[in-house]
Amino acid sequence: MNSSPRIPGNRFLHSPGPSHVPDEVVHAMSRQPMDMADPRLPAMIQACEAGLRRLLQTEKADVFIYAANGHGAWEAVNVNLLAPGQTALVPATGHFSESWALQVEGTGARVQRMRWTEGQPIDPAELEQVLRDDKAHEIAAVFAVHTDTASSVTSDLRALRAAMDAAGHPALFVVDVVASLGAAPFAMDELGVNVVLGASQKGLMCPPGLGFAAVDARAMAVCERNPTPRFYWDWRLRKSELAYRKFCGTPPQTLLRGLEAALDLIFEEGVDQVLARHALMTRAVHAAVQSWSEVGAVQFFCKVPKARSTSVTAIELMGGADPEAMRAIARERFQVAIAGGLGMLAGRVFRIGHLGDMNAAMILGCLAGVEAAMTVQGIPHGQMGMQKAIECLAAG
Ligand SMILES: Cc1ncc(COP(=O)(O)O)c(C=O)c1O
């Protein structure tokens, strides 16, 4: 029996993943599973693969979907692309680039890290220099996190690709779009990205539990030659028409139904409109944060306005203000669930997720809940935040 008291009304979910799941996705998942010979099963899997390809803007990449979270997708990329002792270059973006780097090392490959400057995106000039210095081409791949969910910094993938080309370096370009897909523009083929990885619980508006990788022909050739022992994650084994082989076992049907429904919603709304909606929600959040930061203890963590993410905004509290206590008040008293700081930002920032199935009323409710919690906690902040967010949404 559930002993927690019922919460009247809705609790607003503004973590940057898991994000709010639309009713259409919830309903799609509330159906009985199919038997393995049911022809609707391969049709649903194909719809998910084709939808991901369309959203990623790739014509030919192979798509591999896993019953796994984002860490599973990282593992798939690590073991399929890197032989033991080979090196991945990981430009630092914050907690998530470092977590990925540690996982690469944990699977037997090596990592060359590029230094982290707080609040800044990856510096393309520095990437170019590091690659130029790698005369022996020991770096097999660049592993870049598009949006680091912990720092809320989005890096410029076009500039990173240009830096790799300018250096004339043959490393694979591998991009984590876990936090950015469906919220920020992305085009795999046009950007010259060899492998993309993502997960279901953020801009894809599904519950956690699915990870995926899209792999171009060049990366697939690297995978074919790679001697790293692997089985569950192996793209060579999963490249098949058979559902049971594609998933190395029984496909996670319920989550796939959800993904199919979520992709339908994205294409019905139109990808451009989805991105424009995210840009508007983000402008409203930024308008509020800008106003809050004019007095007192609040500031944007990302210092470069054009690198601020359209998925999540990390907000730093100064002067001894405790983001965790404020966050608990926001959740328990005002029913607004926001995220805290991760890794080196624990206890320094709180984060507002504004991605996925999100509208103006939800954003205003979230901002009001955060402002109310700051007021309860006595955290000094500018008083025009809500007004500025409303003006921003009114202007459209
Ligand atoms: C950018 C990024 N990459 C990878 C991950 C890891 O995903 P998961 O928590 O689903 O394992 C996350 C999780 O938030 C993330 O934000």
Image (cartoon, helix red, strand yellow):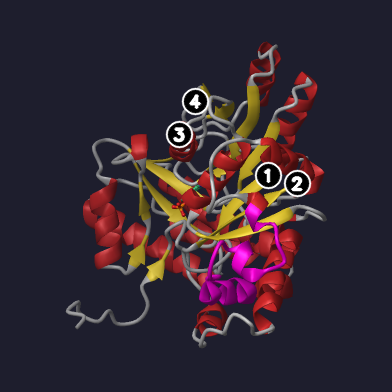
Residue under the image location 66 percent in, 11 percent down: 133
Residue depth check, mark 3 versus mark 4: number of the one nearer the observer: 3
Residue under the image location 74 percent in, 59 percent down: 53
The N terminus, quarter of image: bottom left
Residue kind at label 1, given as amino acid type: Val
Decide: marks 3, 2 in contact (CB < 8 A)? no
Residue 216 circle label: 2
- Local packing at callout 1 (Cα closer than 10 Å; few below 14, some 14-19, many 20+) is many
Decide: marks 2, 1 in contact (CB < 8 A)? yes
* Span of residues in magenta: 237-262
Q: Tell me if residue 19 can be seen.
A: yes
- x then y, percent, for residue 268: 72, 75
Q: Earlier in the sequence, mark 2 or mark 4?
A: 4
Looking at the rendered structure, the secondary structure element under dot 3 is helix
Q: Which of marks 1 and 3 is nearer the N terminus?
A: 3
Residue at mark 1 = 195
- x then y, percent, for residue 172: 70, 33
Query: Above or below — where is 228 with respect to 233?
Result: above
- Image quadrant in which you'd find residue 247: bottom right
- Local packing at callout 2 (Cα closer than 10 Å; few below 14, some 14-19, many 20+) is many
Decide: marks 3, 4 in contact (CB < 8 A)? no
- Image quadrant in which you'd find residue 8: bottom left
- Image quadrant in which you'd find residue 317: top left
Disc 3/disc 2 C-alpha distance (Å): 25 Å
Residue depth check, mark 1 versus mark 3: number of the one nearer the observer: 1
Residue depth check, mark 3 versus mark 2: number of the one nearer the observer: 2
Looking at the rendered structure, the secondary structure element under dot 4 is loop
Residue at mark 4 = 117
What secondary structure characterizes most of the magenta part? helix
Q: Earlier in the sequence, mark 3 or mark 4?
A: 3
Disc 1/disc 4 C-alpha distance (Å): 26 Å
